[in-house]
Image: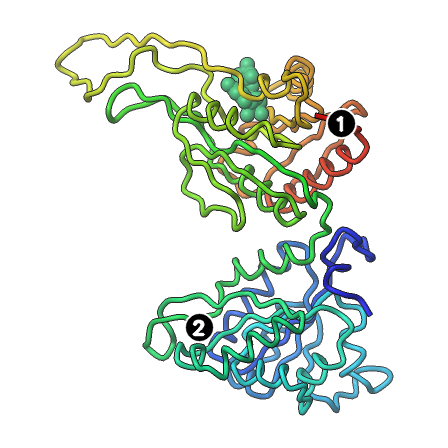
Amino acid sequence: MRYVSDIAGKNDPTNRPRRKILLGITGGVAAYKAAELVRRLGDRGIEVHVVMTEAACGFITPATLQALSGHPVYTSMWDGRIDNGMPHIELTRDKDAIVIAPATADFIAKCVHGLADDLLSTLCLARDCPLIVAPAMNRQMWEHAATQRNVAQIRSDGVTVLGPDSGDQACGETGMGRMLEPEALAEGIAAFLAPKTLLGKRVLMTAGPTFEPIDAVRGITNRSSGKMGYAIARAAIAAGAEVTLVSGPVSLAAPVGAAMVRVQSAAEMFAAVQKHVAKTDIFIGVAAVADYRVAAPRKHKIKKTEEDQLRIDLLPNADILGWVASRPKPPFSVGFAAESRNLDRYADEKRRRKKVKLMIANLAQNAIGADDNEVSLMDDNGTHRLPRAPKDAVAVEIVRHIAALCSSTKRKPR
Ligand code: CTP
């Protein structure tokens, strides 16, 4: 028997790069979102095998899920495609988890009582892997005392409940009970399955650009979407770290579980880092910090008519990463080098100059604003190149590398 703490905890017994789940779809309107969920899980390298209840097939066809998952879809206890004729046992034996999405009120009630009258409910009862449910139902059904009792019971039985969310419902009502959106669900499932390589580690990060005001409406900034930094924050949280994310102005959703510190200027970012650094095990500077600030920003908007030529005096900003890495007892420090040419040489020089354990090098023109990235990891052992991949996948590799380096680096006691 594998327990949740084994599969999701630091004693990850499988240590497999590719995770496999069984996605159980039950009969709710949100079943149509399962198609998108399969894709989002695939983007994260998770292999999905689908089982549907008869009611689910009334909302979305097995053929759709088969095409998207790339694997046969099972709907019946009497399916002859499993060699030993025992689909209700066999289908979960090589899986890391069963995920029921959407999980109707009725299906949750069946799980609570151990009912096993179709393939999916029997698989849940006969499973040897963790169970995750994503409830989806009308708000009155969700709020009903029976449902609340059942949800409390499955939680105490060790089942992980993701969601529900509140908002507009298919029935026209508004309230709690919507299934989480596929992206949020995929993130929750990936986090659940990730090996907990940074369990108990406190990670302080900077991400996004900084904004240095010139006047009330204008400013100097660097091009940075924050996507890479936010992806690393999510991957670190999934790996069990406690993450404080000091973020410049970006239009991204905060990573679930991160302690957010929102700043505008490099000076504010530096102050936030100084405030939090003492309790930090790992510092990751991903922010594109402006190297200069305006010496005397104007309180009011500068009018064009006021001056023919505008001169702005700039003063250098503090090097936040350099400051962190040169503290007497520095955290394990990681920097990013975004260069437009001579990538390896500039990045390695920067690594030595800033005295960081790991420098992640990428070409600015390949990375900024994109959803993919191609990076090289430079440390004392040399340069490790990662193939171009979605930033979420690159972030997982970066976190894996940091965890490996940290565990092989003995820190001086504070
Ligand atoms: N960094 C920082 N504070 C600064 C400038 C940079 O913390 N004032 C960090 C970045 O977050 C990144 C690393 O230092 O992790 C490298 O940033 P980069 O802008 O590439 O390097 P610079 O030191 O600014 O060097 P240059 O602009 O000459 O390339």
Classify 181 as above or below 28: above
Residue positioned most to the left: 305
Q: In the rendering, at what x and y percent does residue 15 appear? A: 81, 53
The image quadrant where one finds the C terminus is: top right
Q: In the rendering, at what x and y percent does residue 165 appear? A: 44, 65
Q: Earlier in the sequence, mark 1 or mark 2?
A: 2
Distance from the alpha carbon under mark 1 to that under mark 2: 47 Å
The residue depicted at 55 percent of the width and 87 percent of the height is: 55
Q: Which residue is mark 2?
A: 177
Q: How is the rendered protein coloured?
A: rainbow
Q: Looking at numbered disc 2 in the image, what kind of residue is underneath it?
A: Gly
In the foreground, 57 or 114: 114
Q: In the rendering, at what x and y percent does residue 247 appear? A: 47, 35
Residue positioned most to the right: 84
At label 1, counting other C-alpha atoms closer than 10 Å, the crowd grade (few under 14, some 14-19, many 20 or more) is few
Q: In the rendering, at what x and y percent does residue 212 appear? A: 36, 22
The residue depicted at 57 percent of the width and 84 percent of the height is: 109
User: Quick check: can you spot residue 338?
Assistant: no
Disc 1 secondary structure class: loop
Q: Point out which mark residue 126 bears.
A: none
The residue depicted at 38 percent of the width and 73 percent of the height is: 169
The image quadrant where one finds the N terminus is: bottom right
Classify 194 as above or below 331: below
Classify 388 as above or below 358: below
Q: For residue 311, what is the image quadrant?
A: top left
Q: Looking at numbered disc 1 in the image, what kind of residue is underneath it?
A: Arg
**Residue 112 placement, left or right of 296:** right
**Residue 196 placement, left or right of 373:** right
Q: Quadrant of ligand 1?
A: top right
Q: Which residue is mark 1?
A: 411
In the foreground, 342 or 400: 400
The residue depicted at 71 percent of the width and 71 percent of the height is: 71
